[in-house]
Image (cartoon, grey):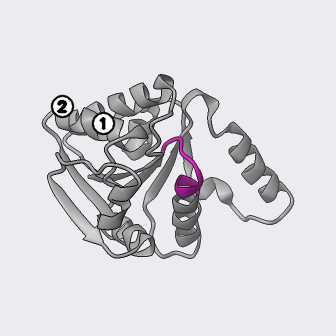
């Protein structure tokens, strides 16, 4: 299975998050899955990719070449797909992935998350989306989405994505 990870590339992230991302990468490789990610070598993306590569796993990085001016790109990817824009990057994530994990991140991660659940809602794909809620990072967002559903702004939001608080829970959802 090709598993897409959305997550921050920031170098300022607390180790509680990056350590968990590394372990997720180890598990992806050990279970013979392929990591699909934004190609960054730092933050959540870089930590997960290191876990994959340290366990002889495969990875596909997808990014515009110019993003290297903002964050270093991972040089150990099994394959790297260069695109012209962030929109094309997100399209390639969908085309090259069987499931999505949303790890802690910032604005870019939220953009990717909301786009992928919107596409699922509009029946453009039927792939699993799992929010990796490390250390309760996404509790407030989940609460907001639940409130939107309670007030009638969303329909059947529980069918759009799953929530996992641990790596074991992620892989139970993926089965």
Residue tagged 2: 54
Number of numbered discs: 2
Asked if labels 2 and 1 touch by Cβ distance under 8 angstroms, the answer is: yes
Instruction: Pick whichever, 144 or 105, lies toward us.
Output: 105
* Stretch in magenta: 103-110
What kind of element bears circle 2?
helix
State the CA–CA distance, disc 1 to disc 2: 9 Å
Q: Can you say whether 165 is above or below 107 in the image?
A: above
Q: Can you say whether 152 is above or below 128 in the image?
A: below
Horizontally, is 3 left or right of 173 in the view? Answer: left
Q: Label 1: how many residues lie within 10 Å, few (<14), some (14-19) or many (20+)?
A: many
Instruction: Pick whichever, 52 or 74, lies toward us.
Output: 74
Percent position of residue 123, x then y: 52, 75
Percent position of residue 70, x then y: 41, 54
Q: Residue at x 26, y 52 (%)?
A: 1
Q: Is residue 91 in view from this perspective?
A: yes
Q: Residue at x 30, y 72 (%)?
A: 83
Q: Quadrant of the C terminus?
A: top left
**Quarter of the rendering containing residue 36:** bottom left
**Quarter of the rendering containing residue 9:** top left
Q: Can you say whether 8 is above or below 112 in the image?
A: above
Horizontally, is 145 left or right of 66 in the view? Answer: right
Q: Residue at x 42, y 30 (%)?
A: 18
Extreme residue toward the front, this view: 69
Q: Is residue 107 magenta?
A: yes
Labelled disc at residue 4: none
Q: Is residue 98 in view from this perspective?
A: no
Residue tagged 1: 25
Extreme residue toward the right, this view: 151
What kind of element bears circle 1?
helix
């Amino acid at each position: 299975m090709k598993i897409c990870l959305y997550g921050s590339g920031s170098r300022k992230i607390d180790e509680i998050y990056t350590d968990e991302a590394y372990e997720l990468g180890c598990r992806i490789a050990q279970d013979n899955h392929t990591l699909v990610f934004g190609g960054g070598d730092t933050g959540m993306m870089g930590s997960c990719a290191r876990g994959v590569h340290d366990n002889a796993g495969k990875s596909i990085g997808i990014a515009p070449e110019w993003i290297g001016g903002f964050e270093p790109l991972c040089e150990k990817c099994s394959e790297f797909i260069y695109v012209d824009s962030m929109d094309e990057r997100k399209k390639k994530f969908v085309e090259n992935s069987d499931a999505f994990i949303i790890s802690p991140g910032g604005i870019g991660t939220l953009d990717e998350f909301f786009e992928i659940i919107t596409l699922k809602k509009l029946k453009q794909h039927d792939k699993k989306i799992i929010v990796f809620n490390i250390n309760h990072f996404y509790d407030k967002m989940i609460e907001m989405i639940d409130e939107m559903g309670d007030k009638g702004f969303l329909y059947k939001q529980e069918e759009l994505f799953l929530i996992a608080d641990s790596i074991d829970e992620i892989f139970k959802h993926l089965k």
